[in-house]
Image (spheres, rainbow, N blue to C red):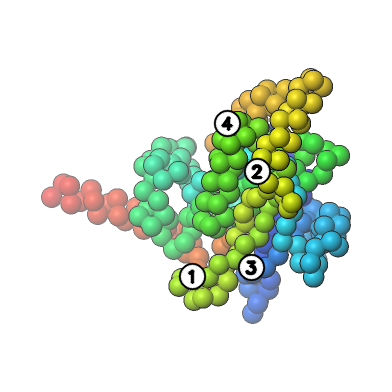
Amino acid sequence: MIKGLAITPPILGRISIGKVVEKNGKRLPEKDDQFTITSQIQGKEGWIKHPLDEQLRASAPNQKLRNIPVRMIFNDPELNLRAEYTLFDRQTGRPLCIGNGESCQRMTAQGIEQHPCPSPDLCTLAQGGNCKPYGRLHVNLDESDELGTFIFRTTGFNSIRTLAARLRYYYAVSNGLLSCLPLQLTLRGKSTTQSYRTPVYYVDLTLREGIDLKQAIQTAKEIDHQTKVAGFNQQALDEVAREGFLNVQFEQESIELVEEFYPVEQEQSVEESRNLDLSMQLKRSVQQVS
């Protein structure tokens, strides 16, 4: 296999809780209070909706899509949800630095270098809001394609923290049968002092409506037994996916996707951030010499 090529789950569409709108000649992200399921094709008015969006919306209260029935395709929580601090180059959509709060990989003129990752608040390269937590959740919505996924991308701490916790909890209580549990994405809202008491929406992962935890675990056991009898090897699928993710160090995104998370007003150019980083390094070097 070609080294450096990201082998990720096949993506059939996108799940979002916002969109990009044009205001005063600028394209800015705008949050929404409901899910939207789109294809991977853009038209003049934005991303084209997937047929599943209309199907699910038809049975939703007031046609507000706030619950989406999903299934995980992997048992390992970290294969379903990947999250890192990521600094993107807005001109190309290419990540320049990816870290986990402890260490990071940074693209430089000399190649990829390893550095400590102090988190965006303490990193000189990340000043100006260029570096954010970036999460990607893969879920299955279309039972006719059991290995195809819809991807939910987010830079929200609330969504990433909640989804990470839920995935690990469900994995633990089901004895590792995460891919067999009947789950749903649920949109929740809350207000904080930072949001000036206006609602902030984030994504949660819950059991499907009308199913309690004991029923869900029993269902997962039955599905696991049936798939094993049929010859399905979930462990091998997880391992192949893990190898595919590790085949690349920097997974590029399109500029259209990156702009959903980086408001123009809040953004500091990557070149300015680089200059600031070099300036701080030079100052430290001068202090050490003196």
Q: Position of residue 21 (x, y in %)?
A: 68, 71
Judge depth for marks 4 and 3 and give the one in front.
3
Rendered position, 215 above or below 66: above
Work out whether mark 1 precedes mark 2 in sequence or the reverse, and give the earlier one. 1
Q: CA distance from mark 1 to mark 3?
A: 16 Å
**Amino acid found under the numbered disc labelled 2:** Leu
Q: Label 2: few (<14), some or many (≥20) within 10 Å?
A: some
Q: CA distance from mark 2 to mark 3?
A: 32 Å
Secondary structure type for disc 1 = loop
* Disc 1 to disc 2: CB gap under 8 Å: no
Q: CA distance from mark 4 to mark 2?
A: 33 Å
Task: Quickly name the residue at label 4.
Answer: 246
Task: Quickly name the residue at label 2.
Answer: 213
Work out whether mark 1 precedes mark 3 in sequence or the reverse, and give the earlier one. 3
Q: Quick one: 31 or 222, which is closer to the camera?
A: 222
Q: CA distance from mark 1 to mark 2?
A: 30 Å
Task: Quickly name the residue at label 3.
Answer: 31
Examine the image and state in which quarter residue 251 appears: top right
Judge depth for marks 1 and 3 and give the one in front.
1
